[in-house]
Amino acid sequence: MAPRHIQVTEPSRVVLPRHTKLKFDETRQVWVILAPERVLAPDEIAVEVLKLCDGARSVAAIIDELAVKYAAPRDVIATDVVAMLQDLADKGFLTEVRETTS
């Protein structure tokens, strides 16, 4: 099955797909994203963002939290976070949580 392409925007709620894990590699002392037949070692900033991608928070909420934490301009953080998350989504490392209707 081909990965579903998503458009990451501020209202998006993104999460690692079920088959993908963010894990600290004790041997190498780095964080890695583990997916079937793929490993990605994100930088420290990406790890901070990915830890917040729990499917409950929107991208806007993640941006707001980071802007407060780092006392940085929200618009600068927004541009960088959306671009980074879109890149990971395009590579199949993120998916979007969809609302279910009952």
Image (tube, rainbow, N blue to C red):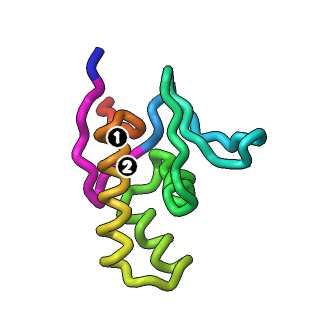
Quadrant where the C terminus sits is top left
- Does the magenta segment cover residue 5? yes
Q: Position of residue 57 (x, y in %)?
A: 45, 55
Q: Position of residue 55 (x, y in %)?
A: 45, 45
Residue located beneath label 1 in the image: 96
Q: Position of residue 26 (x, y in %)?
A: 77, 42
Residue located beneath label 2 in the image: 13
- Does the magenta segment cover residue 45? no
Q: Amino acid at mark 2?
A: Arg
Side of 1 where 25 appears, left or right? right
Return the residue nearer the eye: 46 or 13.
46
Q: Amino acid at mark 1?
A: Glu
The residue tagged with tag 1: helix, strand or loop?
Answer: strand
What label does residue 52 carry, if any? none
Start-end of magenta stretch: 3-14
Quadrant where the N terminus sits is top left
**Visible in this render: residue 52?**
no
Mark 1–mark 2 CB contact (< 8 Å): yes
Q: Residue at x 32, y 59 (%)?
A: 82
Per the model, the C-alpha gap separating discs 1 and 2 is 6 Å
Q: Residue at x 47, y 49 (%)?
A: 56
